[in-house]
Image: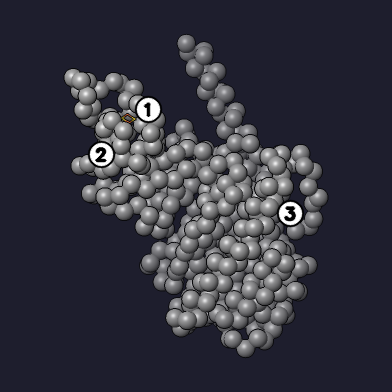
Amino acid sequence: MSFIRNAWYVACWSSDVKLGELFHRQILDEAVVFYRTQEGETVALQDRCPHRFIPLHMGKLVDGRIQCAYHGLEFDCTGRCVNNPHGDGRIPSAARVKSFPTVERHTFVWIWLGDGKPDISAIPDYGVLDSQAGYKTSGGYLHMNANYQLMADNLMDLSHITYVHDGYLGSPEQAGAAEVVESSERAVQANRWMPNISVPGIFDLLYRQDGQAVDMWTNMKWTAPSCFLLDTGVHRVGGQKEERGWYYGVHILTPETEHSTHYYFAVAMPVATALGPDEDRRYQALRRFAFEEQDKPILEAQQAALTGADFWEMKPVLLSVDAGSVRMRRIIEHMLEEERSNASTSINNTAVAD
Ligand code: FES
Ligand SMILES: [Fe+2]
């Protein structure tokens, strides 16, 4: 296994990178340190001093440069060493760290770790989180000790809500719901339609709070390699979408290592969803409970059960509910294959040029 590198990944929430502070996160096995310049730009550098390999985040910011905690080398926002306080102060040419392109968009810091040219237009559209979109938004973060593709399967196949989130997000009649799966070169859409079902707890809270049966939809879009946008809600049986009772769910996965994942989740709901402060707290707590206390243990148990083996080599039984996630995995494999062959082409070209 390896990761698709030529893609934008969410590194953190924009609010995680504060002026005057160092923030660090491991992404695709790469240690990265972040800080914000006086001008408000986010800087992302390799988090490893080239002298004795101390994480730079253990150092401090001095006049917009990171000063290493161990012997005081200083690195500017391009990753170049610009101050050596020792000897004659000469700066060895190898005294530099990698810097990575970042973009702040839709309340996230996105990072590009690949060798290819970053294309800003490839950042998935999470405009529902932008303040001008006019939705009520909130978000959170969870760390999962599981490969990101296991979590992606979970999000792509929402039949699990009947069993894992029974009562909160799920209800018994959701299993067996009709699902339509469509895919393109870099995306999969999986739509489930569930007419006349008992209302799941969270949706009752958002809609009428009367426990009456509803029609429900969960339309999930995956954009490669690991970005999900869910359009989900309920309305009265046989009715139409109303001004409340639905929301957009944002679910974004960033691989930390082969066996661990950063999980960013958020919600954007219409302003007509007039929850009082207590109801809002209950809603947030229920969602967090669902992800942290219900999904997370399942995912981590799955990862442990795989004991490092390849997913397909384990010969998983396939069910109809796996249609979306199998397509997603195929697209990822294809993209990985493309990256590998581009990398070997460029190595061969270099060899010829030599
Ligand atoms: S380890 Fe960073 S300056 Fe020595
Ligand atoms: Fe779940």
Q: Is mark 1 within 8 Å of ligand 1?
A: yes
Which numbered disc covers residue 323? 3
Residue at image coords 29%, 20%: 92
Does residue 48 lie above or below 33 as drawn? above
Does residue 144 lie above or below 217 as drawn? above
Residue 227: image location, x then y, percent: 55, 53
Closer to the chain start, of discs 1 and 3, is: 1
CA distance separating discs 3 and 2: 49 Å
Which numbered disc covers residue 65? 2
Residue at image coords 55%, 18%: 348
CA distance separating discs 2 and 1: 18 Å
The answer to whether one can see residue 327 in this image is no
Residue most extreme to the front: 70
Residue 156: image location, x then y, percent: 65, 57
**How many other residues sit within 10 Å of disc 1, few (<14), some (14-19) or many (≥20)?**
few
Closer to the chain start, of discs 3 and 2, is: 2
- Mark 2: amino acid: Arg
Near-viewer residue (178 or 110): 110
Residue at image coords 57%, 52%: 144
Labels 1, 3: front one? 1
User: In the displayed structure, does residue 314 sit left or right of residue 330?
Assistant: right
Residue marked by disc 1: 52
User: In the displayed structure, does residue 51 sit left or right of residue 128?
Assistant: left
